[in-house]
Amino acid sequence: MASDNLHTLNKGQIGLWGVLIPGLAQVAPAFNLFFTTGVMASLAGASVPLVFLISMVAMLATASSLAQFAGVYPSSGSFLTYIAKSIGAKTATSVGVITILGYIIAFGGIYIFVGSYIVSNVLGNPHVWGITQIVTILYGVLVVAPVVVGLKFGVRVSYALYIFEAILLVVLSVAFLAHGGPQGVSLTPFKWPGGSKSTLLAFSLAILAFGGFEAAAPLAEETRDPKKNVPIAVMSTVIVSGIIYVLGSWALVTAFGSSHVSLLAADPNPFHTAAAKYISVLAPLVTWIFLTSVTSSYVAANTQTARVIFGGARSGLWNRSLSNISPRFRTPAAAAIAFVAPSILIGVVSTAFTNPGTASGFLGTYGILGLIIMYIMANLALIVHWVRIDKDDRSKHVFTRLIVPIFGMAILAIPVYGDLQPGQAAPYKYLPYLTVALILVGVIYTMILAKRKPNIIRDAPGLLEGAEL
């Protein structure tokens, strides 16, 4: 196995910027600001910037857990490696299945949403069954191509798209703040909105907006000085994204006026409305900022998730053919295609039962729960690591490896409650049952694997860390 180049990634081909950009891109700040700020405003009023600010601080706790692990076990297996080394391969396998399925489901919803968005806003036609599905499939091929061609190429694509997105977001935000809107710039958006159920739901949306910050971790094996660069990238992704969220939401609330936040909440595309009013020359670019944001996010997500699938397959946790490397491009092409193809299929098939908007919202909400489960287990794994492995210098890590991950898990309970709360309308009322089903799939798969191939479970922690290399 050690000499088998079919299962070996290129070492040290990217530096700090190369490993940082995928995380920044996958968070997709423009996508979340454009379509989340209004909903958050309907729940928390004008205090959306404060909600984003507190959520950024909260998510740094989970980012800290993943960053600390990345500094100890740099591996393409990412959270699989961290959980396997701390809690065990069985738990890591279950969490891996749950997380990857969650990603596939969530991205399936976004694929069909993007396809519908392109048909309506670029081609100028409403959602037409057949045309939207074809556009969705073509878009899926487009965003997986950079991942197959090469890591450097994919990072460069993400880099160019993200810089375009970030610069225009900052320009628009500064322009809104400079104008002052109908009531001028104030600190009202940073006042506590209260502790109602609606506010908790706003926090749930804000926390979910940081999803994907961990994209740097699976690139560790291909990064120069990974024990230094990957943790910096993970933490920096949350901080930079948080600053953009706070600035952008503050600018948007200012543009509409703190006392007129209901208009912001009711507007389906508030950034375009504000741009058309205060900086009309950039208003036509809002559509392209959205497409840039979601495209760079997809390229980054496909890049990192393909490597998690690759890492798991290389260790035998799932079919080893998914660890095959493209002979020409030296990339985990099989894993990338295995991730993207079912996502597109789910997105396309979902429109046979409902419209793209409903499908996107439901699939995204359902799928993201798999990601949250991974975040929670990564925090728990760090605590277990502190108890079991950090015996000699345990007292030095009480805050970072006990208190911080406990705080991280507590914060992650907010979006879990928001998504699974009782009394929701269909199809969201089925989420508790579907979440249990998702967990059972991971557990049952692991039980079967442990029964049929106990040696895989025994050797997985070392293999995930790259012992075979």
Image (cartoon, helix red, strand yellow):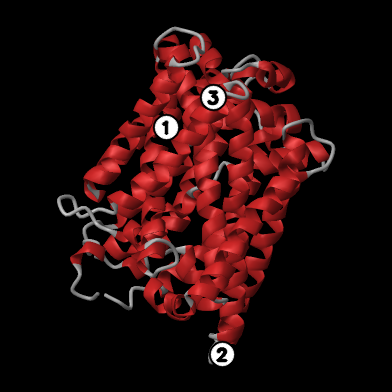
* Residue furthest front as drawn: 452
Residue type, mark 3 in image? Leu
Work out how far the residue at label 2 is from the one at label 3, CA to CA, in angstroms. Answer: 52 Å
Counting other residues with Cα less than 10 Å from the Cα at mark 2, is it few (<14), some (14-19), or many (20 or more)? few
Residue marked by disc 3 = 177
Q: Earlier in the sequence, mark 2 or mark 3?
A: 3
Counting other residues with Cα less than 10 Å from the Cα at mark 3, is it few (<14), some (14-19), or many (20 or more)? many
Work out how far the residue at label 1 is from the one at label 2, CA to CA, in angstroms. Answer: 44 Å
Residue type, mark 1 in image? Ser
Q: Earlier in the sequence, mark 1 or mark 2?
A: 1
Q: In which quarter of the view is residue 281 placed?
A: top left
* Residue furthest bottom as drawn: 392
Q: Earlier in the sequence, mark 1 or mark 3?
A: 3
Identify whether 335 is placed above or below 299.
below
Pick the quarter of the image with the C terminus. Answer: bottom left
Residue in the picture at 55% in, 76% down: 88
Q: How many labels, in total?
A: 3
Residue 389 shows up from this direction: yes
Identify whether 32 is placed above or below 336.
above
Residue in the picture at 68% in, 37% down: 190
Q: Callout 2: helix, strand or loop?
A: loop
Residue marked by disc 1 = 293
Identify whether 344 is placed above or below 171.
below
Q: Position of residue 7 (x, y in %)?
A: 26, 64
In the image, taking residue 179 as reference, residue 399 lies left or right, namely right
